[in-house]
Image (cartoon, grey):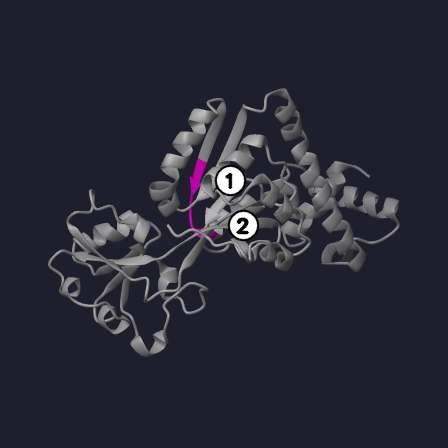
Amino acid sequence: MNLRQLRYITAVVRHGLNVSATAESLYTSQPGVSKQIQLLEEELGVQIFERSGKQLTRVTEAGKAIIEMAERILREAESIPQVAKEFADPQAGTLSIATTHTQARFVLPPIISEFLRRYPKVSLYMHQGSPRQIAELAATGAADFAIASEALDRFDSLVVMPCYQWNRAIVTPLDHPLCAKNLTLESITKYPIVTCDFDFNSNAPEGVACNLPELQPNVVFTAMDADVIKTYVRIGLGIGIVAKMAFDPRTDADLCALDASHLFQPSTTKIAFRRGTFLRSYMYDFIERFAPHLTPELVDAAVAARSSEEQQQLFANIQLPAY
């Protein structure tokens, strides 16, 4: 048994038991993948996959247990270079962060600036995308950390920790009728709305605090970028819904911002990393700079949690700050 065989069986599962696609992704041949899987099964004395002719049809019960352990072994093996680098030079390395536009534009700049002053030999890379894309980057190891308010909890392979809570504001032109009114759901749904698509998604954990189907909001445009939303408010497309942190009185002086916290459930921004990741000392420091309550001890406890329920219990009594 070797690491190559373990990589092959885990990759086959990721590619839906398609050996051709697996071979292509690993830059090898289909017969080579099939042969290595067969050799591993013969050595272990059990079938990992059931077959119909030459096609793999399903993972056996034994295979499920073996693949789960193989994934854990591969994650540990991938961490070995990081362990070596930590001992060679704890102050040098790389840090890859996947996050949303709002976090990258309005929250992270002072934290990253301070972090890089402290660790000038760390190269930092940032990836922006939708919450789902961000979660997938962390789950596959393409990013060290994912920072978002949605989607992270859908991946069992991620250690997810809450950082802070935030809510929303309605942005309008300065002369808009809403600027002189008390905000209600009825009042905002009378106007075309420009927003993120999850704000009016009744299946989202964070959404409008009422029965939306009766109100029928007129969402005319959606975007993940708060600056884009504000741009389309400026050209008269509709009123906008953005995170309160995304409104800057200096650069957005031509807009009116109305607190909408009483209309929406608060959202929680979270930070996540792939289970089994070896955290360099500067990675612990970044987490704590971003969320001061996430001390190295608490992060290690979250890693050691045996289930998502046990992990959530660690943070049950922590009062999260509001941004």
Q: Is residue 177 above or below residue 232?
A: below
Q: Which quadrant holds residue 178?
A: bottom left
Residue 243 covered by magenta stretch: no
Q: Which quadrant holds residue 80?
A: top right
Residue type beneath disc 2: Met
Residue type beneath disc 1: Ile
The one of 104 and 140 positioned closer to us in this rendering = 104
Alpha carbon distance from label 1 to label 2: 10 Å
Instruction: Give the percent coordinates (x, y) of residue 89.
Output: 59, 21
Residue 59 left/right relative to 137: right
Q: Are marks 1 and 2 in contact (CB under 8 Å)?
A: yes
**Dot 2 lies on which element?**
strand
Looking at the image, which residue is at 26% across and 49% down? 247
Residue 64 left/right relative to 83: right
Q: Which residue is disc 2 drawn over?
A: 161
Q: Give the range drawn in magenta.
A: 126-131
Q: Which residue is disc 1 drawn over?
A: 287
Looking at the image, which residue is at 33% across and 79% down? 214
Q: In this view, does 214 lie above or below 134?
A: below
The one of 56 and 322 positioned closer to us in this rendering = 322
**Dot 1 lies on which element?**
helix
